[in-house]
Image: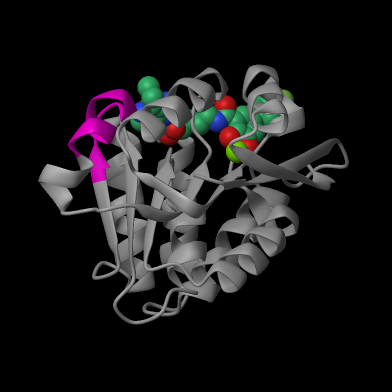
Amino acid sequence: TQSTRPQRLLHAVQKNATKGDPRSVVKAIDNFCRQKEWAMNVGDEKGCILDSVVSEVNPVTVLELGTYCGYSTVRIASLLPPRAKIITLEFNPDYAKIARQVIAWAGLEDKIQVVEGPSGEWIPKMKEQFGVKTFDLVFLDHWKDRYLPDTKLLEDCGLLRKGTILLADNVICPGTPDYLEYVRNSPRYKSQYFKSHLEYTKAEDGLEKSVFLG
Ligand SMILES: CCc1ncnc2c1ncn2[C@@H]1O[C@H](/C=C/CNC(=O)c2cc(-c3ccc(F)cc3)cc(O)c2O)[C@@H](O)[C@H]1O
Ligand SMILES: [Mg+2]
């Protein structure tokens, strides 16, 4: 039977990356996507902006919305301090399965919890199920029309604190107009746009970094 693109991406990792070396896993995926098949990972250019935000925030508790193959999950987790954790939500079981294997190849299982299911169902359970008080950093990279509702849900569930950073991918391409309008105009956020390019292409895209003011 024909393999899927995520399966081919995983095979590229297992073939070209060093087991237990997260940065070589990131490199192998970027090479695969540049040379073989485009895939919707945040990529190396926007990935450097992600790295700098993660290093600046030095988060202990991270939430990622939309795991896909685990590229940004591994990229973030590779920069976390020892006791820090990332919870990543993914509702497609096939993608979750691939992501778990990419994460295992990177040797980051202890820092990463892949939770299968829709963000709308799991966000309200974060406190009771995972003992989360508030998130220090949220990386939004799932369906673009879910960014705004999930941000409001995070607010309503008391999962954001004064200083929590929301970092959103694709605010230009494919675009998240309602989310952008909200974080840029709400008095509860201080927002900043980091101009970049759509992964592996010359098209414009960027990340929006928004600080929750409480
Ligand atoms: C229900 C809530 C909910 N709960 C849990 N998991 C959820 C979820 N909603 C979605 N997922 C999972 O997240 C991932 C989806 C990610 C969606 N991302 C893009 O569409 C995208 C597109 C381009 C692009 C494509 C084509 C172009 F031409 C240009 C740009 C570039 C990018 O960087 C992009 O991120 C998948 O794993 C979903 O299973
Ligand atoms: Mg994206």
Above or below, comparing residue 134 to residue 92 in the picture: below
Above or below, comparing residue 68 to residue 22 in the picture: above
Give left or right: position of 213 versus 78: right
Res. 51 visible in picture: yes
Main secondary structure along the magenta-highlighted residues: helix
12 in the magenta segment? no
Q: Quadrant of the N terminus?
A: top left
Give left or right: position of 104 versus 54: left
Query: Which residues lie in the magenta part?
Result: 115-125
Where, by quadrant of the figure, is residue 191 drawn? top right
Q: What is the number of callouts on the image?
A: 0
> At x 49% / y 37%, what residue is drawn?
5
Res. 39 visible in picture: no
Residue 25, how many percent across, how many down? 50, 68
Residue 146, how many percent across, how many down? 48, 22
118 in the magenta segment? yes
> At x 51% / y 47%, what residue is drawn?
139
Residue 173, how many percent across, how many down? 74, 28
Above or below, comparing residue 185 to residue 109 in the picture: above
The way the protein has been coloured in the rendering is: one colour
Give left or right: position of 16 versus 69: right
> At x 42% / y 50%, what residue is drawn?
161
Above or below, comparing residue 118 to residue 136 in the picture: above
> At x 29% / y 26%, what residue is drawn?
118
State the residue in front, 196 or 71. Answer: 196
